[in-house]
Amino acid sequence: MQTTYSIQLFDIKGATQEEYAALNRHINLMRRERLPDDPPIALDETMNELHNLPSYVEVKIWTTKQKGSDEIIAMGMVQMLNMEENRHLAQFDISVCPDFRRQGLGRHILELITHAAQSEKRRLLLSESYDRIPAGEAFMTRLGAQKGLVGHINQLKIAELDQDLLAKWLARGNMLLSEFMLGLWEGPYPEDQLVAISQLVELTNQQPFGDLEIEEFHLTPEQLRQQEQMIFARGNQRWTFYILEKSTGKFAGYTETRWHPNRPEILYQDMTGVFPEYRNRGLGRWLKAAMLNKVLIDRPQVKYIRTGNADSNAAMLKINNELGFKPYMANALWQVELDHVLAYLEQHK
């Protein structure tokens, strides 16, 4: 690397206000390339997220600056989960400002990332790319990485929502009220149900993993609380609709959304899932319809709902397509063996 650049490890918990501000400017610069119509992320959101990382999540960030400048021109991040599962994985992200690409900055940051992963005995690296930033896919291709899962961020325009369809799904759901109860949590999960909820959110493991070498995730109630703390520290507001089987008291499924007052027109649809023994009863559509109905009534400022789906998730895509979700942005999760990356770096010294 030319001596006009310097790479520094970012002090996640103890950076100065100016350093956090520079990091936030870089994040928003790269975000604008991916989401040109969206408002920027406020500085306090970035700071609060970094200050409230769960204890089981290890994150390292490196920033690159030109000497004599406070502006970040490239950034790298690696995240490793210290859980029982997936101790072979490290997920990373590298972002380089457009004017500074193809100058070796990403490769030098990658070297630091691989050393961090190697020190924790992680053998497989994961990263994500988006079709709106072709440089990401090109970089992963040069590494020899393989696409493990391809998908889209899909978007529903509220103005195009079929209200008659929504009413029909709600009516079908109401016909099941003798067997099931529909409930709602606004904000944190209730303490007295946290153990059962930690099992409910394991429905995320029912999503397609494609060819990714990923083990199922199992969050403890304490880890779930830490995850919540970070979500709410950023200023997010979360709604969770759930369905309970009355005869057994067991959860049958749930759906969640996140909304932030700094981006009032956009709502993010997170996980929707129903346990296998309760499927083909219309519970997924009931959950979706109940959530959309509440959004229409209580959040009239929302114009767009976005959700991420694997292209192979046929069941969820069928429901979303019926509602009017359309592709908004393509993405891909890549995986590459650490030894392969080390060999690549050695070849390009």
Image (cartoon, rainbow, N blue to C red):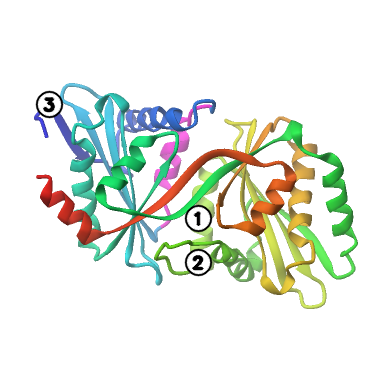
Residue 15 higher or lower than 124, as above or below: above
Labels 1 & 2 near each other (Cβ < 8 A): yes
Quadrant containing the N terminus in the rendered view? top left
Farthest residue in the bottom direction? 248
Identify the residue at image location x=45%, y=41%: 48
Residue 143 is situated, as x and y percent measured from the top left of the image, at 25, 49
Q: Which residue is mark 3?
A: 4
Give the distance between the C-alpha atoms of the residues marked 3 and 2, in whole angstroms: 44 Å
Q: Which residue is mark 1?
A: 227
Q: Residues within 10 Å of mark 3 (few under 14, many from 20)?
A: few
Residue 175 is situated, as x and y percent measured from the top left of the image, at 90, 62
SS at circle 2: loop
Does residue 9 appear to the left or right of 262 in the view shown? left
Q: Is residue 138 magenta?
A: no
Q: Which residue is mark 2?
A: 219
Q: Is residue 52 magenta?
A: yes
Which range of residues does the magenta coloring cover?
39-54
Residue 100 is situated, as x and y percent measured from the top left of the image, at 25, 27
Residue 311 higher or lower than 202, as above or below: above
Quadrant containing the C terminus in the rendered view? top left
Marks 1 and 3, the one that precedes in the sequence: 3
